[in-house]
Image (cartoon, grey):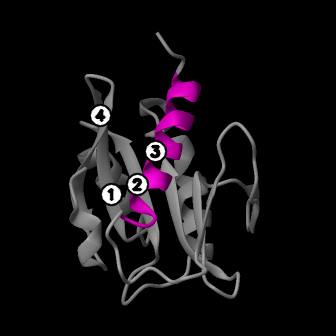
Amino acid sequence: MLDSSTLRHRITRIIAATRFPFVDQESWGKNHQTIVNDEVGRYAIQTPIGVLYPSIIITNDDGSLRELGLVESAEDINDDSIPRWKALSDVAPYGREFKKLFLYVPEGYEEKTLKYFEDEGINYDGIRGYRVENQVLKILPFKTLNDEYDDVIT
């Protein structure tokens, strides 16, 4: 069985490759860039609590920050993650109304994650569940606040 870190990094790469952008998404900017922090920290973000490496970073055509994605393991869904979540929400840009911060959590942890975010007043765009089924990653929409694309089941 894979350790949780290796599995999370693999899941991160699959999410980045299939959802940022979606395969048929026409509204994706020509020069938007998707950057993955997996075993290699490629893109650091300075936050009030120090340097953090979110799982997925999307930049605009001009290189500015567009979106952040966090792929969490079950062990990450706890009080210790609150400062990190808050810090990344603070630096994430706004979409139409909400911060462009997306969380991908193991299936069954969506409600618990939502409760943390609501209780702590953390601004975010979406929470998704994920599971591995017959060696295929399934993404399960849970809550979306800004965009129509984000409710796509893969």
Residue type (three-letter) at the residue carrying disc 1? Ile
Could one spot residue 81 in this view of the protein? yes
Question: What span is in magenta?
Answer: 4-22
Q: Main secondary structure of the magenta part?
A: helix
User: Gap between marks 4 and 3, in whole Å?
Assistant: 12 Å
- The 10 Å Cα crowd at callout 4, few under 14, some 14 to 19, many 20 or more, is some
Camera-nearest residue between 108 and 121: 108
User: Gap between marks 3 and 1, in whole Å?
Assistant: 17 Å
Asked whether the residues under the numbered discs 4 and 3 touch, taking CB atoms below 8 Å apart as contact, a structural biologist would say no
Q: Which residue is mark 1?
A: 127
Question: Picture coordinates of residue 72 (x, y %)?
Answer: 47, 42
Asked whether the residues under the numbered discs 1 and 4 touch, taking CB atoms below 8 Å apart as contact, a structural biologist would say no
Closer to the N terminus: mark 3 or mark 1?
3
Q: Residue at x 54, y 58 (%)?
A: 85
Q: Which residue is mark 3?
A: 14
Residue type (three-letter) at the residue carrying disc 3? Ile
Look at discs 3 and 1 and give the one toward the viewer. 3
Residue type (three-letter) at the residue carrying disc 4? Arg
User: Gap between marks 1 and 4, in whole Å?
Assistant: 14 Å
Mark sitting on residue 18: 2
Q: Residue at x 76, y 59 (%)?
A: 44
Closer to the N terminus: mark 4 or mark 3?
3
User: Gap between marks 2 and 3, in whole Å?
Assistant: 6 Å
Q: Is residue 90 left or right of residue 114?
A: right
Camera-nearest residue between 124 and 80: 124
Asked whether the residues under the numbered discs 1 and 2 touch, taking CB atoms below 8 Å apart as contact, a structural biologist would say no
User: Gap between marks 1 and 2, in whole Å?
Assistant: 16 Å
Asked whether the residues under the numbered discs 3 and 1 touch, taking CB atoms below 8 Å apart as contact, a structural biologist would say no
Question: Picture coordinates of residue 34 (x, y %)?
Answer: 59, 64
All told, the count of numbered labels is 4
Helix, strand or loop for disc 2 = helix
Could one spot residue 72 in this view of the protein? no
